[in-house]
Amino acid sequence: MNEQQESRPRVRVAVVFGGRNSEHAVSLMGAGGVLAAIDRSKYEVVPIGIATDGRWVLAPDGQRFEIEGGELPAVDESGTTLALPSDNGRIVALDAGRIPTTLGQVDVVFPLLHGAYGEDGTIQGLLEMAGVRYVGSGVLASAVGMDKAYMKTLLAGAGLPVGPYVVVRDRDWRLEPERVIKDVEALGWPVFVKPSRAGSSQGISRADDLRELERAIELAREHDPKVLVEAAIEGREIECAVLESPGDEPPAASLPGEIVINDDHEFYDFTAKYIGSDTSLAVPADLPAAASDELRRMAVAAFEALGCEGLARVDFFYTPSGELIVNEINTMPGFTATSMAPQLWDATGVPYAELIDRMIQLALGRPAGLR
């Protein structure tokens, strides 16, 4: 580092991770990757963990959060308690028995949060209220992207193909289970049952008959009282990552990739994603050139239909007849160096550290508030 670089002030980035939901550990694993890869000559990092009880704490810098011996990582709750950011990014430390002190302002927040109370527009709304710039999609896109039922409605409204599904709301299941079952049976067997507002394949299961359906709905309801039941679609699972472009350029789509898992998993569940070592990503996916081009076009269309910003990952089914069906869009996909979205961009020519830099720079280039 030369003298001029040393004198230039670094951008102060608060990397926020954890959260009070079932994807707490997944968030930490992504944060560990970012903390290790971010350019320290360019960025000063303030690592902030959100404990499972919702408390914000100052976390150790440079820590790698990994699954060890089957144990999932968690935020160390013994760290200094922090007040929520306010006053244009000022963070206050609240040590017990001491006068509150300020840690200074941050220029931008990188919210590496997944699931409810993070990826769903809640932290985005908090940061908007505080007038703080942040990485990723805004309130509406985050909320719609988190709720698969509304997501499908919006995607279909934009002319994008989605598979058949039934929404099972809490009141419907408690008061009219017979009607719900009749609606689901019209989809045909098997079906896939998932929480409407959860990610990382948490609470998802396959049902081949009525008995399994009831059990699958109850499992999904452990994560969310609102449940989505989808018709099984025969086809390959193809993913594409979309990255916002600077200025007035349209968003860019990565090369498509295909998830390859072994026969021990019926579908791409949490174990296959984060614990099993027998899954891989083939990039580029073996698709006809026309199908690959159309998939990338549709991925950008889905990104724009929700009004996404920063990065998103769009998941598709590619059927034996050559049809492309949008499964879902993730506005804050898994973000370890080996997660799908970073791998897709790495294969497209944007390495992990550069992807982190681009996302932060995009956030710095956007104003807080309406845009």
Image (cartoon, rainbow, N blue to C red):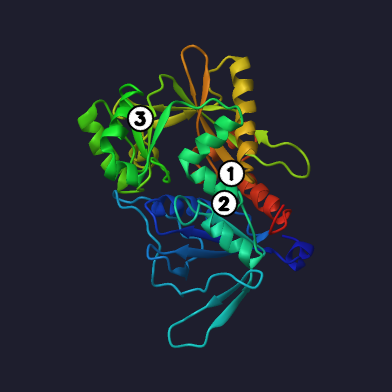
Identify residue type, mark 2: Ala
Q: Position of residue 138 (x, y in %)?
A: 61, 51
Q: Secondary structure at mark 3?
A: loop
* Residue in view at x 34 percent, y 29 percent: 183
Residue designated by label 3: 267
Circle 3: is it few (<14), some (14-19), or many (20+) Cα within 10 Å? some
Disc 1 versus disc 3: distance between alpha carbons? 27 Å
- Point out the residue furthest to the left here: 211
Residue 184 on image: x %, y %: 33, 29
Q: Is residue 213 visible?
A: yes
Using residue 329 as the reference point, say whether residue 221 is left or right of it: left
Q: CA distance from mark 2 to mark 1?
A: 7 Å
Give the spatial CA distance, label 2 vs label 3: 31 Å
The image shows a total of numbered marks equal to 3
Mark 2 neighbour density, 10 Å: few (under 14) some (14–19) many (20 or more)? some
Q: Which residue is mark 1?
A: 352
Q: Secondary structure at mark 1?
A: helix
- Give the label, 2 or 3, closer to the camera: 3
The amino acid pointed to by label 3 is: Phe
Whether the residues at callouts 2 and 1 have beta carbons within 8 Å, the answer is yes
**Callout 1: few (<14), some (14-19), or many (20+) C-alpha neighbours within 10 Å?**
many
Q: Residue at the far top: name it.
A: 321
